[in-house]
Structures are given as C-alpha cells and as structure tokens.
Amino acid sequence: MQTGAGWMLGTDKRETDAAIAARKAILLFFKDYESDKFFKYDRYLKRIVRPLYNRLHGRAKTTGFMVSFQMLRRALEDAGWTVRVNDHAAARRHPGYPVGLLGYPQLLEGWSLPNPALLGPSLFDHPSAAPDLFADPRFRKYLTLGPWMQDMFAEAYGEDRCRAWFAGIDTEAWPDMSAQPKSVDLLVYDKIRWNRDTLVPALLDPILEQIRARGLTAEVIRYKFYDHASYTAALARSRAMVFVCENETQGLAYQEAMSANLPVLAWDNGFWLDPQWRKFSETMIPASSVPFFAPECGERFQGIGEFGAALDRFVPMIPHYTPRAYVQRELSFAASAQRYAEAYLSCG
C-alpha cells in the first residue's frame, strides 16, 4: 500500500530475511515521475492536488512508470517471489544481496545502499543521459523495455550489461472481447504527444476521413483522456483498433487491445520522434510504435500515403488475425517474472 510517505512494509522481518537467505526475495526500490513545473518544489503540492484533478477530469490516473512497476510486482508475486518495496532496512542487513532500482532517475540521487543493483526498466530515456552510469561498481545490469530500446542501450553500455524485459499483460483482466456485440468498426487510439498542431490535420484527420469514406464507423479515444472503465467499454464495442502513436517503449494500451483480441493497424513511422532525440544524436534514432508485434496481430503503415492500402488489406482480415494468441505466447506474466528474476539474481 502506498502512502504519501512511501510504501508501508507489512511483511515480518524474519520472513524477509529467510526469503533472502533462500534467494526467493526481490528487493525493489521505486520512485515515480515527479518534477517541478511552475515553481520550485511545486511537485509536493501536486501530490495533493493531482488525485482530485484526475477524478474531476476523468483522466488516466497513473503514470507509465507506476503501471510498469505495479505489473512487475504482481508478476513476481504471482510467480512465488517475496517482493519488498523500498525496504532500506532489509537491504542494509544484507549488503551483498541484489536490489532492483526502477522508475524515475531521481531515485539514484544520493543513492547510499551498498548492494549490487539491477537498474531499470525506465530511469533513462537514452544512455547519453548517464554515460558514466557503470562507473559505479554497485550498478551491474540495465533492463530495457522493447527491442529498439535494447539496441540503443546495448550499443552504449555493452551487450553483456543490458537485458531485455517486458511488463506482462494480464489476459484475465483483458479477456477475449471478439464475441461481444460490435457497434464500432475501428477504435482509433490517438496517442499523438508532440506536434499535434501538425500531425492531427496531416495524419489523424485524413485517417478518419479514409475510414469513413469506406463506409466504416470510427470512434476516437485519446491518451490520458479516459479511465479504465471507458477504455474497456470502447474495446468491447469495437472490432479492431487503429493505433496512432509516434513511438512506444512497450505500448500497454495497444497490447491490452490485442489481449482483448482486437487486431491492430498501427502507424509505425520507424523513428523516435520525441523532440529530445536531438539532445542525444545527430541522426534520427530507429524506433517503433508497436515494439511487440507480428503479422498475426495486424498491419502497419509508415505514413498517411500508405494508410489507404494498409486499411484495405487490414479490414477483410480482421476475423482472421489472432492477436490474443500472440499476447498469451509472447507477453505472459510468467515470462515477465522469469526474465526479471534471472537478471536480478545475476547481479549478486
């Protein structure tokens, strides 16, 4: 349970120590995204105001950092691991036992525990943000989300230090919805985060025009402007999804749709379009909006010029794609827990 002061620790100390001795405990240290926006230290005020604002505006209530952490913790616990969160006392009692550090990079500021550490997922957007990270001998391995992130970090930190990981998808929470009554042909997921003044008229609006020109129905749902219940209901009434996003490290929303057995037609431009890429590279960085994907999941298109042909291939195949089978096979909770645990134990 999380409080304003941190995480409440309810497990008995002796049980934790016994699990550590048996190498069946995982000590996680997590810090969510926080920043000062309008004035110094206003992040503390936002902790109080944000829950009320979210309720009033019906927005998504958790950050990607938090969702990834929660899914990791659940996967590990489902797999039988004893998971302790922000338990500095347990780590100090066992200084040679590994710890996992994930979330926002402020977690590393003044980090004092001597334990060998597995870093990530999250923390840094690009290895150039922390080029000397492994000069600290406590830091042993780095976890990345998504194949394109793995390539980017491994090039800087070395293949031996970087491990690929994914957050498992709860296929029970996102069941097969293909047999539900359908009133919408295509649920258009709008996750355009940058240059909306350009991309909405140049990409999103023409997508909708071409869908409707073919006599298909469309519903638009915008990232951060919905809650869990409304998203679930939208998936249930839709036959398939058009996913419009610049790039993803994992892409939980489209994977939840695939778990619900909605095929996906994805804009996959091929590059990291976050404006900050110019801070790290002189050339555009390869990336994907659907880093976990296969032909059985649906179709991709690189730009609006390719959309019409991709749509015409995609629509007749909607009943024949098997995206849920892909999620069950490639993105399971069990595999997610195993990948993390193997990387974690290799650190100490």
Image (cartoon, rainbow, N blue to C red):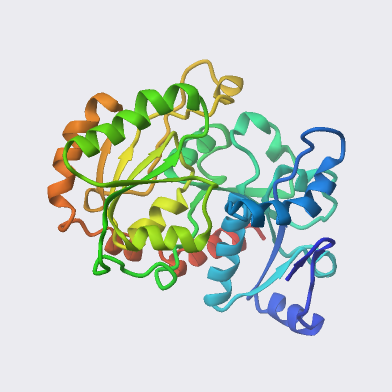
40 or 235: nearer the viewer: 235
- 200 or 113, nearer to the observer: 200
Name the residue: 34% across, 35% down: 268
Residue 269 in sight in this render: no
Can residue 45 be seen here? Answer: yes
Could you tell me residue 75's position as x and y percent?
53, 69
Judge by depth and name the residue closer to the eye, 278 or 147. 278
Number of callouts in the render?
0
Q: Residue at x 39, y 55 (%)?
A: 255
Q: Is residue 136 left or right of residue 251?
A: right
Q: Please give left or right for residue 340 compared with residue 186 in the image.
A: right
Question: Residue 201 location in percent, x, y?
Answer: 39, 24
Q: Quadrant of the N terminus?
A: bottom right
Between 20 and 261, the residue placed more toward the observer is: 261
Q: Is residue 81 above or below residue 332?
A: below
Which residue shows up at 33% across the image and 57% down it? Answer: 258
